[in-house]
Amino acid sequence: MLINKRICFIGAGAMAEAILSGLIRKGVVNSEFLSVTNRSNESRLHELSQKYGVQADASRKSEFIKHADILMLAMKPKDTAATLEEIRAFTHSGQLIISVAAGVTTDRISALLGHDAPVIRSMPNTSAAIGQSVTGLCGGAAAEAIHFETASQIFESIGKVFQVEEGKIDSLTAVSGSGPAFFYYFVEAMLAGARDVGLDERFATELVQHTMLGAANMLIQSGKEPSKLRVEICSPGGTTLAGLDVLQSRGFEDAIRLCVQAAARRAAELGKKFS
Ligand SMILES: NC(=O)C1=CN([C@@H]2O[C@H](COP(=O)(O)OP(=O)(O)OC[C@H]3O[C@@H](n4cnc5c(N)ncnc54)[C@H](OP(=O)(O)O)[C@@H]3O)[C@@H](O)[C@H]2O)C=CC1
Ligand SMILES: O=C(O)[C@@H]1CCC=N1
């Protein structure tokens, strides 16, 4: 066991489950040190308590929060203000606050808490569910190296961790937070294309899954630039160039760049909207 601290999750959704299951699976925190709270869904708390052995009793919400060393804010950005107003009386400046809420700034969280507890803002992604998240971390004014170390330990249990300045976290959100969805959309389109050229769905799914996996591993293991890897596949007058010509003429690169820009803009807008 690496972290000997009580962690209370405020929010019991998909992201909370991905993180707490990673912590337990990797033995970073003993399940007895974990508590989970939500707004009203008691059956969800029961499910998490049965599945992971965490403390999840709706009637003990204020007690869990008071006694926690770390509060993990895992509610939707739109619910952050109401939630912090509800729980602030049970929080104190000796706690480490870690938020996963997209767009909500550390200043905003501190203002809502009304004290100067250290705040770390994180941006994981849904691959956390299989221990392969990419998580960005940034800190508020009171966050020190020790707080980053603790947060890194937590998020390393569900994948890779990168520390960034807060000014860059909206951009990171667009790339690694939303990125899996953009990738899945590309895969959906590949599957539709595979059907168009006469492959049956199950076979096409296997072909596409393993092709994407191999290509992703090539990117990491070969150390080559993606453009070089792409060019290596293109035979003059061959199939790949025939396909790429269509992507280029249909503005594929522009579409992806505008997509990432729009996502980053929305992260910033969420921050303003909930500030
Ligand atoms: N999905 C993704 O890819 C990523 C999401 N995130 C962030 O993670 C956060 C959580 O997302 P996700 O897990 O998908 O959300 P969910 O909607 O699955 O879960 C939200 C949880 O917040 C709880 N909640 C709301 N109000 C309160 C309250 N007052 N007190 C305690 N709990 C409360 C809800 O409880 P109840 O059900 O009872 O209403 C629910 O358990 C979001 O802020 C999102 O931006 C970050 C990175 C990636
Ligand atoms: O779509 C969203 O707002 C969240 C943040 C990153 C992934 N999902």
Image (tube, grey):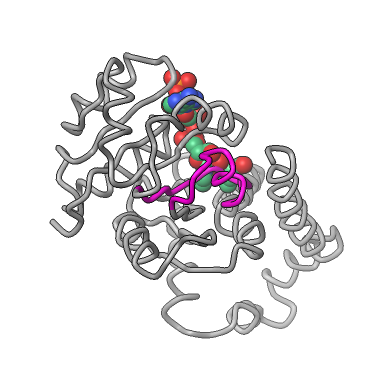
Q: Is residue 200 visible?
A: no
Left/right placement of residue 148 relative to residue 138 reads left
In front: 38, or 81? 81
Magenta highlight on residue 109: yes
Q: Where is residue 217 shown, x and y percent of the image? A: 43, 71
Q: Quadrant of residue 148?
A: bottom left
Magenta highlight on residue 115: yes
Residue 141's place in the image compared with 199, above or below, is below
Q: Quadrant of residue 214?
A: bottom left
Q: Where is residue 223 shown, x and y percent of the image? A: 48, 85
Q: Where is residue 37 shown, x and y percent of the image? A: 35, 27
Task: Specify the segment rendered in magenta.
Answer: 95-117
Rendered residue at 45%/83% (across/down): 222
Residue 220's place in the image compared with 62, above or below, is below
Which residue is at the far right? 249
In front: 66, or 259? 66
Left/right placement of residue 125 relative to residue 255 reads left
Q: Where is residue 238 shown, x and y percent of the image? A: 69, 75
In front: 205, or 224? 224
Rendered residue at 42%/34% (across/down): 14
Residue 9's place in the image compared with 262, above or below, is above
Residue 112's place in the image compared with 3, above or below, is above
Q: Is residue 52 visible?
A: yes
Quadrant of the picture in which ligand 2 is shown: top right
